Image (cartoon, coloured by chain):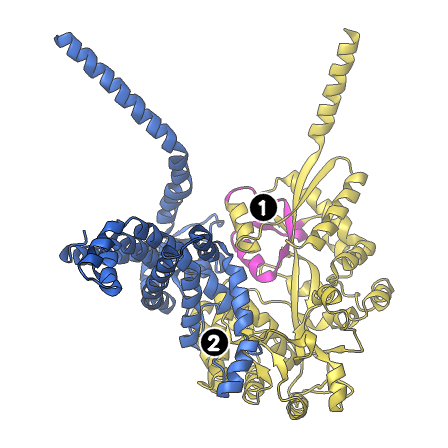
Chain colours: A yellow, B blue
Amino acid sequence: MRNFLKVFVGILVLGLVGSSQIEITFWSAPNPSQEVFWRRMAEAYMAEHPGVKITVSPMPETPTSEAGILAAIAGGVAPTASENVFIGFGDELVRSGAIVPWNAFTGWDELIVARSMSSTIKAWEFPDGNYYIIPLYVNAMLCAWRIDILRELGYDRPPRTYSEVLEVGERLKAVYPDKFLWLRSELEVPTWWQRWFDFFVFYYAASKGQALITGNEITADDKAAVEVLRFFKTLRDKKLLITEPLATGFEVGATVMTVLGPWSFPWWKENYPELVYGETFVLSPPPVPDWYPVDEPIYTFADAKGVVMYAQATPEQRQAMWDFIQWVLSDPEHDLLWVEITGMLPARDDVGVNPLFTGYVEKNEPALLPYAKTIPFAVPPFAHPEYVEIQELMGLECIYPVLIGELTPEEGWQAWKAAIAPLLK
Amino acid sequence: MESGNRTAIKVKTTVKLRKELGGWLLASPYLAMAVLFFLIPLGWSLSLVFFDWNLISPVRNYVGFYNFREALSSTRVHNAFLNTYKFMAIIVPSVMVVSLGLALIVHHLPRLKQFYAVGFFLPYLASGVAISLVVRGILSYDSAFNEFLRSVFGTSPRWLRDSFWATLVISAMIVWKLSGYYALIFLAGLQGIPRELYEAAALDGAGPFTQFRKITLPLLYPAFYTVLVLAVGLCFGIFTEPYVLTGGGPRFATHTWQLEIYYQAFERFRAGYGATVAVLNAVVTFASILVIRRIVESWGTRRGFR
């Protein structure tokens, strides 16, 4: 009888401990390395905080990760928080009341300081003054150049301006008629997100990072935009830019330049070990118009995503998740682990100067260093409820007609502005 | 006597009921699936068409028939509508000819008929995405095929960037994928034609061509009818090939109903409008199949095939 009582009390105690444990769920991006990072973070946190149980799983990506999140929210099975949300989709979630602001939690200001995000975070402020997304990583887009081929052509550094690019291109065609300067078959495809990796990159470079859309207004630098379109058109007319698919590409030297994010390096290491930074390729900011001041930094587009907290979570779960996220992001060692595991740079102001990161990068992946230094000049996607259609129309109404010569660059740019005007009301 | 009849009727009724119950029981998994994955989503979609809603917002904006008005005046939907018939005009006759040709070849093989029939069926099982990527490789500017064309003709088509060629490439891929499957239907039809008919025709002096025209084709009418309806229905569901290869371009030349529904519902998060396009797609599909069925049925009746 006494033994029975002991067992009964034991079970009761265990049950009470179990029930006092807060369970929270976190969806990582559908990318194995990011899932590994979050699992390790969760395990380490739970070891220190036995009252919290964190379940990490990759978010569904059928048909897209955004649609997976929407379906989960609609079905009432959203996680407590997830990563992999960019500001455009975040805006959709904010307008639907599906996510909560992080800055409402106690300790927000301390986190900004601890993670060195005072400058980076500014681009993530929503029109209501709140911060619904904590930026996790920033992939500034740079141009990779086959320096081995450039050297053969008589250049020891990549071209900086449009004229220099055209000069390199002419020499390339003279020596290698079958090679192209740039392969960008997606330029003729209207798919909205492809604009991030072509027009946006060159536009932000030419315009010193001038926003395309602010609120419901077009705030783009018209002159810069037209210059970019004219540059694309000239490249295509001179057969330096190919807009048809190629079976080969930059990796085998069929083209000399490509717009590149740091996520390509692990793949290159595995499949193209001959691509060595400094030997076969170098990185540079996107080319700029000839009038662009030499002493000014060159901006670019940033593929940047962050963490959001879902409104479906209970107040207790939200607080537990905030504590967890605060714990993860307050320690620079965790961000270093992020770099080591994912190969992507954390959204920190100091990633290009903090010896913790620069030391690791210089030793292990020197090609990441230019990316780190570009982060302060990397512009994330704009936030507007109609971002998909706005970017889709850029391909349909502007870039494609300009490329095939149906419209002049000026006409193409005006056509895009006219086409999106009804969406900005 | 009367009570005996009554008992007999009772027994018959019980047996009938039991049989019916058994039938319902056997059909229940399918029925449950149909209710769960067809009827409920259909009802849900029909309820969505009157709203401007992204599935998660607490506010559902009732817009009446605005979604229909917008869809009916949308260039994107117009293109999807017209392109479907453009694809149909290429795919349906091609798939008929190719699959019938395959079926005839397999039917006349002296041995290994099943092996070849399965072989031709395999493309139907292949992943659309994988096949599209292979095709993109074959048609890429620097592929051996295009190098050959340029060496002979001095130029190569912009296969996926020219509206004419892109339409043709996508159609060819679908014909390739489906022909083996439809060939099985024709093969079943061919195997059902009594050999005696051909022997009698041969005795009457009919040559192979006359036999084919007067015996094979009329008796294959049910197979033709089935393949036609299936192929027409399929043209309204084209998605993977243009999604991977052209994104619906150039200039919506390969845009389809399914691409439009995907774009609106999963990229723009306009569930209400996406559902509206899906409903319009369903209506156009049913109407088109109905019209084509009527035409083929009346033609079959006139020619005495039915």
The picture quadrant where one finds residue A321 is top right
Residue A349 colored magenta?
A: no
Q: Residues within 10 Å of mark 1 (few under 14, many from 20)?
A: many
| Residue A269 rendering spot, x and y as whole percentages | 75, 66
**Residue in view at x 45 percent, y 79 percent:** A415
Type of amino acid under label 2:
Trp
Measure the alpha-carbon separation of dots 2 and 1: 48 Å
Quarter holding the C terminus of chain A is bottom left
Query: Disc 1 designates what residue?
Result: A311
Residue A86 colored magenta?
A: yes
| Image side of residue A115 versus residue A29, left or right | right
* Callout 2 secondary element: loop
| Residue A399 rendering spot, x and y as whole percentages | 51, 79
Image height of A50 relative to B300, above or below: above
Query: Disc 2 designates what residue?
Result: B159
Which stretch is magenta? A75-104
| Image side of residue B34 versus residue A245, left or right | left
Image height of B142 relative to B119, above or below: below
